[in-house]
Amino acid sequence: MDGHEGVYGFIDQVKHPSWWDATIAPPLAGDKLHVCVLDPTREPYPRFSALPADIDIARRLRGEG
């Protein structure tokens, strides 16, 4: 995560747009993704989502959308 050295998270394949749309390339190691946190308590790493719908929901919950 930018600005947070040593912080990691997990995005499973169904939470990336490429799982749902064959025209979107799957992520590669080193790619930067815009994500939201789905479960900060998941061990060993928090669970993230790169799906636009989840990101929109997170923005609304924070009062940004």
Image: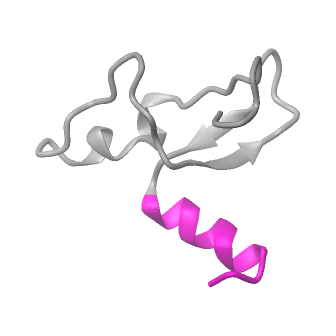
Q: Residue at x 88, y 34 (%)?
A: 41
> As rendered, which of 3 and 57 lies closer to the eye?
3
Q: Residue at x 80, y 15 (%)?
A: 44
Q: Residue furthest left?
A: 23
Q: Residue furthest right?
A: 41
* Horizontal arrangement in the rendering, residue 63 relative to residue 58 (left or right): right
**First to last magenta residue range:** 52-65
Give the percent coordinates (x, y) of residue 43: 83, 19
Q: Quadrant of the N terminus?
A: top right
Q: Quadrant of the C terminus?
A: bottom right
Quarter assignment of residue 5: top right
Give the percent coordinates (x, y) of residue 15: 48, 42
Relative vertical location of residue 63 with respect to residue 10 in this rendering, above or below: below
Judged by its main secondary structure, the magenta piece is helix
Relative vertical location of residue 44 with respect to residue 64 in this rendering, above or below: above
Q: Residue at x 76, y 75 (%)?
A: 61
> As rendered, which of 54 and 29 lies closer to the eye?
29
Give the percent coordinates (x, y) of residue 46: 75, 31
Give the percent coordinates (x, y) of residue 10: 62, 26
Residue 15 part of the magenta-drawn span = no
Q: Residue at x 70, y 23 (%)?
A: 8
* Horizontal arrangement in the rendering, residue 25 relative to residue 31 (left or right): left
Relative vertical location of residue 7 with respect to residue 40 in this rendering, above or below: above
Residue 53 part of the magenta-drawn span = yes
* Horizontal arrangement in the rendering, residue 54 relative to residue 33 (left or right): right
